[in-house]
Image: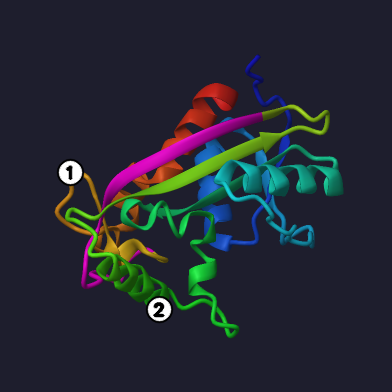
């Protein structure tokens, strides 16, 4: 049974200021007060699952347990078909250097591994986002958004973040890195998941 959100305050279980701002603006029309995990000084739980849904569940339920508030979390990344779905849930890990994240290094690794496998063209991939909205009584709703496209080289564009400069969405002749934030947010994997969330729980 799908559950509507009837509360006044929602915790978004992220320490990412950009994601928090995006959620605040998307949920503003519904009169919900949105707070972030960083504002409440919450620790980030260890993500131990090998799929987006499992890790999103860990983050949402940990935030509920810590605060008693309903919590929304997301787990997202890029899955490259020629790499058997990698990096997938390890998307951010591929960019870790010990001194912060280097997505230029991560993009280069992605292309290098595709070349090593002589992967056929087009080198198809998908950006994936899974949202979990959890309540204190244990109920949860799960929503998925997928943006299909292909990995291209060399990287193009300085907009966006992460792997955006090497990802060209289906039906587009530019990468996400070349698109304005407004255009990207209209079609992104996160926008698609949030649309389902709003239609089900808020609208």
> Residue shown at 58%/26% (left/top)?
202
Q: Horizontal and vertical percent for residue 62? A: 78, 48
Taking 18 as reference, is 57 above or below it?
Answer: above
Quarter of the N terminus within the rendering: top right
- Nearer to us of marks 2 and 1 is 2
Q: Secondary structure at mark 1?
A: loop
Element type at marker 2? helix
- Is residue 147 highlighted in magenta? yes
- Answer left or right for 8 relative to 125: right
Instruction: Say which quarter of the image contains residue 164.
Output: bottom left
Task: Decide if residue 146 is in sight here.
Answer: yes
Q: Is residue 47 above or below residue 118?
A: above
Using the image, tell me which numbered label, if any, was put on residue 41.
none
Q: Nearer the viewer, residue 36 or 167?
A: 167
Residue under pointer 1? 171
Query: At x 46% / y 78%, what residue is drawn?
Result: 102
Residue closest to the far left = 173
Q: Which residues are magenta?
A: 141-160
User: Is residue 24 visible in this depiction of the protein?
Assistant: no
Residue 132 percent across, percent down from the top left: 62, 38
- Reading the image, the residue beneath label 2 is 105
Q: CA distance from mark 2 to mark 1?
A: 27 Å
State if disc 1 and disc 2 touch (CB < 8 Å).
Answer: no
Nearest the camera: 67 or 39? 67
Residue ranking furthest to the top: 1
Pick the residue in front: 33 or 11: 11
Q: Residue at x 39, y 53 (%)?
A: 84
């Amino acid at each position: 049974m799908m559950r509507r959100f009837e509360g006044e305050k929602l915790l978004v279980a992220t320490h990412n200021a950009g994601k928090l701002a995006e959620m605040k603006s998307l949920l503003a029309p519904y009169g919900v007060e949105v707070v972030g995990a960083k504002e409440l000084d919450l620790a980030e739980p260890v993500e131990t699952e090998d799929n987006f849904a499992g890790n999103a569940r860990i983050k949402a339920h940990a935030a509920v347990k810590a605060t008693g508030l309903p919590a929304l979390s997301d787990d997202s990344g890029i899955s490259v078909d020629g790499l058997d779905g990698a990096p997938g849930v390890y998307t951010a890990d591929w960019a870790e250097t010990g001194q912060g994240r280097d997505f230029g290094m991560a993009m280069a690794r992605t292309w290098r591994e595709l070349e090593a496998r002589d992967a056929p063209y087009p080198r198809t991939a998908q950006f994936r986002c899974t949202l979990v909205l959890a309540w204190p009584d244990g109920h949860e709703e799960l929503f998925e958004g997928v943006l299909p496209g292909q990995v291209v080289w060399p990287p193009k564009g300085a907009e966006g973040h992460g792997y955006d400069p090497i990802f060209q969405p289906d039906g587009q002749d530019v990468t996400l890195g070349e698109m304005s934030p407004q255009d990207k947010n209209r079609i992104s994997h996160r926008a698609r998941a949030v649309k389902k969330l709003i239609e089900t729980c808020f609208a």
